[in-house]
Every structure is written in structure tokens, then in C-alpha cells.
Image (cartoon, rainbow, N blue to C red):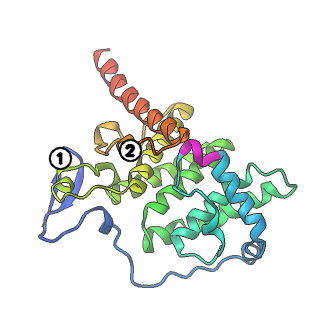
Amino acid sequence: MWRTNLADGVTINSEPGSKSTDTAAIRNHRAPRINTPRHISYYGQDPGRINVLANLFLDCINGEHQFTQYETSAAFSTFPDHPPDLLFLHAAMLAAGATFESQSDSSELSDDFAELSESLIFTCFRHAPSICVIQGLCILSWRSLASGQDHLGWTFLSMAAGMAVHLRLHVLALDEIAAQSVKPPLETVQTFWSFYMTDRTSISILGRNCILPWRRVNVPAIETYFHDGKCDIAQISFAWQCKLWYMHDQNMDQMCVCL
């Protein structure tokens, strides 16, 4: 039996023993077929170049946008031999990082990694839905918007919203979850707010309505995870940008109602 929580617009399984966010992703038991293109495997044989691109992403993009919790490029040491969702995420990170490289083939390299990432989207949706998919889609959206491909940026962001709702990221603070004394992990909360900020940034560029309205958002504030000053200036900036966008949404709604 299923019931719908009308207040938060999310379907909740009310059966005894049902779980929430961590099991919302029901994986298909049939192993996906991933055929990594030969030229991508060739890039993987140059770990130095891969590390450069990964570090460019971390240094130039991730600090401000907090797409992932990665602090080093160690996870790329075995690229491209990764599960589908991680390969999707890592290819998106490398595609974005390559936009900051100044080599003669950097643009082509960025496109190659973006094409690999894009080719894995529906494989991940079908076989490996996870927060890595949301992170990768937000990165692809950022890259597309930055390169003037607004239609692709909007499409990737819409897909990220669908996955976020499927994984219940937008209602992490619901009483149904709080009653189980389960505090969502920082990575999950950070992933949602990173999507939220990317969504709001995109609508300010494109002049469209937001994909996920603020009234449907029931997520802990990310600054509640920063204790004893254990955060850097980039995290503080990110937390305040998210808070200001949320306040902007609330107050703009009130202004429009008054008008």
C-alpha cells in the first residue's frame, strides 16, 4: 500500500520495515554493459594527464559549487575501470576540468569525456541510480551553461531534479525520517544543495521558472553540519549562497502574491 504525503509532494512507502533514502534506488540485477571507447581507455593510460584534469576541476570549480566531497584526485587512479555511476561522475568531472586546461587538444578532450558521460546517463538511471548521478548531471549542466549550450544545461538539470526526487533528497528532514533518528549524511545534503544552487543560478541566466520549487524543499541546512569551525571559506560561502537563494525564493513568492 502506498500513500502520498500531500504537504511535501512525495510518495512514501508505509509498509512495515520500509526504508527511505538509501533504498529508494532499486537496482536492476542484470549487469549493465559498458563499452568504454578505445580513445578513452587510451587517456586512462596517462594518469598524469587525468590527475591534472581532476585537480583543475577540484581547484577551479568544486570549491565554489561543492558538487562533490572530493579533496584529491586519488579516486581517478583506476580510471576508467569504475562502476557505471562513478564512471559517469568522473567523466563529467574530467570534462569540466579540461575546460580550464590550456593544451592544444583540451577542448577536444573535454568533449570526449562529456560524450562518455552523456552515453552513460540512462545506464545509470536504469542500473545505478545514486547521488553520484545527480552530481554528474549538475556538473554537465554547469559545463553546458558555461559553454552557451543552454538547452543541454536545462535538460541535464531537469534530469538531476528527477533523480533527486526519486532518491527523496528534497525531503531529507521529513518527520518520517526524523522519527527513525536517522541524520542524513553530509554528502547527501551537500548534493541536494549543490543541485538547488545550480538550479537557481541557471534560472537567473535563462529567465525560466525553477525546476524544484522552494516549497517542496525540506532539507537540513548544510551549515548545521559544520561544527567547531571545521570548514573552509569555500564551504562557508557555499552555505550562505544556498541560504540566500532560499530566502530569495521565499520573499519573491510573497512579493509576487502581493502584486
**Label placed on residue 227:** 2
Q: Quadrant of residue 255?
A: top left
Disc number placed over residue 129 in the picture, else none: none
What is the x, y in percent for residue 51?
71, 63
Q: Nearer the viewer, residue 247 or 6?
A: 247
**Tag count:** 2
User: Disc 1 or 2, which lies upstream in sequence?
Assistant: 1
Task: Look at 38% across and 51% down and name the residue there.
Answer: 189
From this viewpoint, is residue 144 visible? no
Q: Quadrant of residue 258?
A: top left
| In this picture, residue 127 sits left or right of residue 107 | left
Tag 1: amino acid: Leu
Most common SS among magenta residues = helix
Please tell me whether mark 1 sits on a helix, a strand or a loop: loop
Mark 2: give few (<14), some (14-19) or many (20+) Cα within 10 Å.
few
**Residue 137, image x, y percentages:** 53, 55
Q: Is residue 3 left or right of residue 206?
A: left
Magenta stretch?
61-65
Identify the residue at horizontal 67%, vertical 46% (top origin).
60
User: In the image, what residue type sits under mark 2?
Assistant: His
Q: Is residue 206 above or below residue 71?
A: above
- In whole angstroms, how far apart are the C-alphas of marks 1 and 2? 34 Å
Q: Is residue 71 above or below residue 83?
A: above
Image x and y of residue 139, in percent: 57, 52
Q: Disc 1 marks which residue?
A: 6
